[in-house]
Amino acid sequence: MIGVTFFCALALIKSIAVMELQINPVVATQHVMGVVEYIRVKPISPYAMVGHNLYYTYDVRLNDDNTRIWIDDDVERPHLVGSLIPIERQHHKHGVDTYRLLNR
């Protein structure tokens, strides 16, 4: 009984996340640059191979408006503190911005 309840709750949480994305779609994107200020290594992805596809959280200061943001991403190679990285800013319908690290 507990397993069934847990499974149903998990399915409900996933469907709520999908509905939120549909209610607040991306209406514009912009490419910006930022400087890496701090790096945290997250637990390794179950899909990772040794030495590849590690998961990092970057604290980044944007060049255009000096805002500090956090980006979680699965990258082929880590970016060093102080390096300039390309980022995609996604502006959503209800005014929230999200960010995605571009692997170039």
Image (spheres, rainbow, N blue to C red):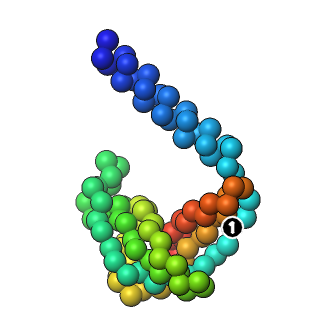
Residue 4 falls left or right of residue 25: left
Q: Is residue 83 above or below residue 38?
A: below
Q: Residue 48 sits in which quadrant? A: bottom left
**Residue at the spot x=55%, y=33% of the render?**
15
Spot the residue most to the front: 95
Q: Residue 53 sits in which quadrant? A: bottom left
Q: Is residue 101 above or below residue 42?
A: below
| Amino acid on which disc 1 is placed | Thr
Q: Residue 75 sits in which quadrant? A: bottom left
Q: Is residue 48 above or below residue 35?
A: above
Residue 14 or residue 93, whichever sits in front: 93
Q: Badge 1: few (under 14), some or many (20 or more) residues near its Cα, within 10 Å?
A: some
Residue 67 or residue 72, whichever sits in front: 67
How many marks on residues?
A: 1
User: Which residue does the numbered mark 1 point to in the structure image?
Assistant: 29
Element type where label 1 sits in the image: strand
Residue 52 visible in the shown view: no
The x, y position of residue 7, in whole percent, is 39, 23
The x, y position of residue 95, in whole percent, is 67, 61
**Residue at the spot x=31%, y=48% of the render?**
46
Residue 36 falls left or right of residue 52: right
Q: Is residue 40 above or below residue 36?
A: above
Q: Which quadrant does the N terminus fall into?
A: top left
**Residue at the spot x=62%, y=38% of the render?**
19
The x, y position of residue 30, in whole percent, is 67, 72
The x, y position of residue 56, in whole percent, is 35, 65
**Residue at the spot x=40%, y=74% of the render?**
59
Residue 21 visible in the shown view: yes
Spot the residue most to the top: 1
Residue 13 falls left or right of residue 49: right
